[in-house]
Image (cartoon, rainbow, N blue to C red):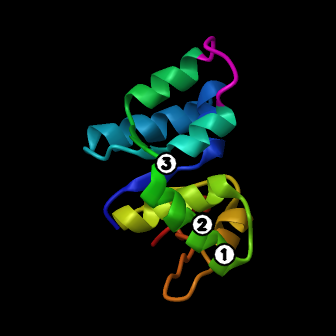
Amino acid sequence: MSGIVYDAGVLIAAERSDRAVWADHRVRLKQGTIPVIPAAVIAQVSRSPRQAQLRRLLRGCDIAELDEDTAHHVGRILAQACTSDVVDGAVVAAAVARSAAVLTSDRADIAISSSRPGLTYPFSTSDPGLFDV
């Protein structure tokens, strides 16, 4: 595993000034790990230009665009998992593309979206919200 992908729950917690999320984020940055956030996740969470904490978090992350090729990859993931949540599919696609873990507050949805042949996402024993690719 070489990186981390943030799901919406991380962004929501950061916007609410959750100290644990901010501490974890700072540690990752100090270790040289730049978190990845799919653009679809930002769309799910962003509601106002006044979300200063959200924008602060985004400055320290790479944004995974949802271009045409990625959209088709997400569609294949969703078809294989028999589900339709584009945001969850984008999170899984970003993790697969980077051999990264997923930090999420919604393990069940990510597990469903990642249930495609050839991929396993066991929960990390060190962090109950972390999936390993």
Residue beneath label 3, please? 66
CB atoms at circles 1 and 2 under 8 Å apart? yes
Above or below residue 25? Residue 51 is above
Task: Identify the element where label 1 is drawn.
Answer: helix
Q: Amino acid at mark 2?
A: Gly
Q: Amino acid at mark 1?
A: Ala
Residue at image point 47% right, 70% down: 132
Q: CA distance from mark 1 to mark 3?
A: 17 Å
Q: Which mark, by number, is residue 75?
A: 2
Place of residue 87 in the rendered image (x, y in percent of width and height, measured from the top left)? 64, 52
Image quadrant where residue 59 sits = top left
Above or below residue 70? Residue 67 is above
Q: Is residue 47 magenta?
A: yes
Q: Is residue 87 left or right of residue 82?
A: left
Kindly give the residue lying farthest to the bottom in the view shown.
117
Residue at image point 54% right, 70% down: 125
Q: Which residues are magenta?
A: 46-51
Place of residue 75 in the rendered image (x, y in percent of width and height, measured from the top left)? 60, 66
Chief SS of the magenta region? loop
Q: Is residue 97 magenta?
A: no
Place of residue 111 in the rendered image (x, y in percent of width and height, measured from the top left)? 66, 71
CB atoms at circles 3 and 2 under 8 Å apart? no
Q: Which mark, by number, is residue 120?
A: none
Task: Identify the element where label 3 is drawn.
Answer: loop
Q: CA distance from mark 3 to mark 2?
A: 11 Å
Q: CA distance from mark 1 to mark 2?
A: 6 Å
Residue beneath label 1, please? 79
Taking depth in this image into account, of 30 and 12 the one nearest to the observer is 12
